[in-house]
Image (cartoon, rainbow, N blue to C red):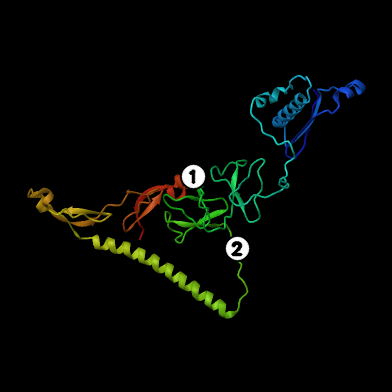
Amino acid sequence: MRSSVIIATLISFAMANPIAGNVARHDTDGTDPCACDYTCLMQAGPDCECEVSAKKNCYDAQIAAGLSCAAPVISEMCQPVSTQSIDVPSHTPTTPYPAAGTLAAAGEACGSGGLKSCEKGLTCLNFKDIKCVDCPGECVDISAPVPPSNSTAIFAYAGEKCGSKGLKMCSEGLECVKKRANCMDCPGQCKIKNKKVVVPVVEEENEEENEEENEEENEEENEEENEEENEEENEEENEEGKSCGGIRGTQCGKGFTCAVNEECSKSGHGSDCGGVCKAENEEGKSCGGIRGTRCGKGFTCAVNEECSKGGYGSDCGGVCKAEKV
């Protein structure tokens, strides 16, 4: 049985036909009535489905024509496929094959051998292993404020929170921008790296309106930050000297301990003795890290330098040290 295999870059298909007028042609020009010609066009390597289907179709046609031909011989590397059920259409598919260079849309696979490139405006991001140069990724619009609803990415998209305990790292091409740059464990937002802001040419009235809006936004942000800081300071000030312990067992706030009245304690009244709240000794106390533990008033968290140099950022812990006056 003769066969010819042509390797090309088109989708594979099979054509197989028993030779018409076999007996007469066999007598005149030596053509074998059981010979089959077939052509397989494929993307790469031997197309076993094409070979098996072509030889099977040819053999079925020979039997239908009343010829006593031997069963087709399948090449060694395609024999495992010959035992499977293969359904290949007998005609050329009418659906056109996608043109070469077709680009992948948002959410489609990209970034590895045989995969498409992303459409304009999209970036191929590998969320599972950012260091792998030939691992498949996903086409993503990194400027989009909201990630796809079905995303299971381990990295944060543009607009998502980052930079604090329990939050994701920003995807490739993004950086975590924080409102308070001096806060090591405060959350920020993923934004495009080195994004240049193009200021349009507008009339003076519009410029004044934009300036006023920006000033109002900055004032609101500063007010919120000041309110948070004032609330923390007020809580700490209110705890100092507050009554605690006693029969009610009143507890002190975070960063304070109950200093029990010594005379009452010496008299043998034990846990029924009351006291006043005093700031704990913060020196050397663990702080920062994944939990973001803060130091008390008058102390700052000295982060472990080796951990910080290792690139772990806000996840690095440290110890509380007295602030320099």
Q: Amino acid at mark 1?
A: Gly
Real-space Cα distance between discs 1 and 2? 30 Å
Q: Amino acid at mark 2?
A: Lys
Mark 1 falls on what kind of element?
loop
Residue 153 placement (x, y as % from top left):
51, 47
Relative placement, left or right, of 115 versus 162 is right
Query: What residue do we see at 62% from left, 41% from top?
Result: 134
The foreground one among 171 and 287 is 171
The residue wearing badge 1 is 310
Quarter residue 227 falls in: bottom left
Dot 2 crowding, Cα within 10 Å, few <14, some 14–19, many 20+: few
Relative placement, left or right, of 302 versus 118 is left
Mark 2 falls on what kind of element?
loop
Image: 315 above or below 7: below
The foreground one among 71 and 40 is 71
Circle nearer the N terminus (1, 2): 2
Residue 81 placement (x, y as % from top left):
66, 27
Query: What residue do we see at 28% from left, 62% from top?
Result: 235
Which of the two discs, 1 and 2, sits closer to the camera? 2
Query: What residue do we see at 56% from left, 80% from top?
Result: 205
Question: Is residue 5 at least partly visible in the picture?
Answer: no
Image: 124 above or below 64: below
Image: 111 above or below 64: below
Residue 196's label in the rendered image is 2
Q: Quadrant of the C terminus?
A: bottom left
